[in-house]
Image (cartoon, grey):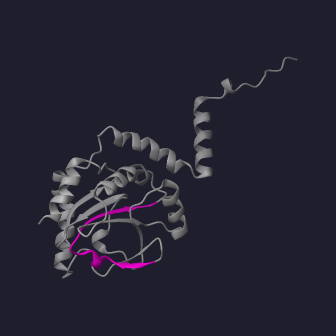
Amino acid sequence: MNKKKFSFRNIPGWAVMLGIFAILYLTGLHTEAIGQVQRLLLATGIKNADVPETLQNPDANAVTTAAAASGAEMAGAGFKMVDLEGKQVSFESLKGKVVFMNIWATWCPPCVAEMPNIQKLYEKIGSTDKVAFVMLSVDEGGMEKVQKFISKKGFTFPVYMPASQFPQEFYSNAIPTTFIISPEGKIVAKQEGMADYDTPEVRDFLLSMTKK
């Protein structure tokens, strides 16, 4: 009787891909793998954040109007956050600064994809007395998971987690979602989905508001 020898060449391509995906999923590496692919997409410039177009986003205008109608002094008034050292911060304490706020999670591939370019933007502008970066994690796995992720990636931008009820004006249909808030506390830009923020247009826009 002739016995056929086993060979990996006899395995269908779809089965190999399924096996690879299963391994990535079981090891928790699927988020990073997908994020890497999406990072390559960002590198092409196709997903650059378009500041003028974002400013005309009707959702952002609607959010700003709703915040004003509610009588709030600024978007996110009353919202409390906690940093990765456990220190509680009031969102209202940021009034007077231009706020770049990004809502993200460790399990979100598009979030993972865009974070390196946000880090570059932070390194060029930084958190100062006129600009504040708020990387707001909505992970439910606890602070330790977020701390490990940030440490592993070597990111240095300020990271926070919600410490009170999430403000309605920051609700979104997707993550990541990025808001730019004026020194007066109004939402002037809203970007749903991943984008490249390390561009001259975004940098100039942020800095232009600090001069008003």
Q: Is residue 99 above or below residue 29?
A: below
Above-or-below relation of 153 to 127: above
Left of 156 or right of it: where is 10?
Answer: right
User: Does 101 lie within the magenta span?
Assistant: yes
Q: Nearer the viewer, residue 173 or 203?
A: 203
Q: Could you tell whether 104 is left or right of 144 in the image?
A: left
152 above or below 211?
Answer: above
Q: Residue at x 22, y 53 (%)?
A: 202
The residue closer to the viewer here, 140 or 96, is: 96
What is the magenta range?
87-105
Which quadrant holds the N terminus?
top right
Location of residue 77 in the rendering, given as x and y in whole percent from the top left corner: 27, 79
| Res 81 quadrant in image | bottom left
> Is residue 142 visible in the rendered structure shown here?
no
In this rendered view, identify the residue nearer to me: 22 or 53: 53
For the residue pair 123 and 76, the one nearer the viewer reads as 123
Labels in figure, total: 0
Rendered view: 193 above or below 33: below
Can residue 50 be seen in the rendering of this structure? yes
